[in-house]
Image: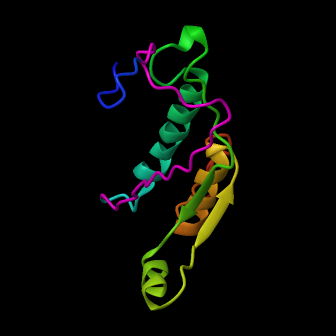
Amino acid sequence: SIDRITSEASPRFIERVPAGAQFDVELVYGIYDLNDQGRTDVENLRYVYMALDLLEASVLGGGGSRGSGKIAMTNLAAALKMTDDYQAQAAGPEQVGLRVIGRSASEVIAAIQAKLGLLRPSPQEPASCPQ
């Protein structure tokens, strides 16, 4: 490409970000009650974590074979905001209902299920039968 003001040529076809650059990213994942109290949405949250892991294992953009586009996710956090949290935020400083820091989708999902009251017995545990 050629800078139209200085007529200076740029020999690279792609823009590069310096190694070690850090970016703040925010993802918003909605949990809706579709006649299951949000269970499906909470359980599907693991796919967001899987996508982030796959992104780390791959590269962003082109030039991956030349070392470009490698990323790492650090300091991941999940916050669950309920209706009451949004009402409190409107009245004053932001109040976050639940904050979990870590990489484990299972840990975050379990905490959200507990907060929403969606816990159910794990598949390893046999269901109790009335006698």
Range covered by the magenta-colored residues: 10-34
Relative placement, left or right, of 66 versus 84 is right
| Quadrant of the image occupied by residue 53 | top right
- The structure residue drawn at horizontal position 41% and vertical position 49%, both measured from the top left corner, is 40
Decide if residue 52 is in sight here: yes
Residue 63 placement (x, y as % from top left): 50, 13
Residue 9 placement (x, y as % from top left): 40, 17
- The structure residue drawn at horizontal position 60% and vertical position 64%, both measured from the top left corner, is 114
Q: How is the image coloured?
A: rainbow
**Nearer-the-camera pick, 54 or 22:** 22
**Nearer-the-camera pick, 5 or 71:** 5
Vertical placement of residue 117 versus 11, above or below: below
Magenta span contains residue 26: yes
Vertical placement of residue 76 versus 30, above or below: above
Magenta span contains residue 95: no
Vertical placement of residue 41 versus 3, above or below: below
| Quadrant of the image occupied by residue 96 | bottom right
- Name the quarter where the N terminus is drawn: top left
Decide if residue 117 is in sight here: no
Q: How many marks?
A: 0
Residue 4 placement (x, y as % from top left): 29, 28
Relative placement, left or right, of 48 versus 110 is left
- The structure residue drawn at horizontal position 53% and vertical position 65%, both measured from the top left corner, is 80
- Name the quarter where the C terminus is drawn: bottom right
| Quadrant of the image occupied by residue 62 | top left
**Nearer-the-camera pick, 127 or 116:** 116
- The structure residue drawn at horizontal position 58% and vertical position 52%, both measured from the top left corner, is 109
Name the chief secondary structure element in magenta: loop
Residue 99 placement (x, y as % from top left): 64, 64
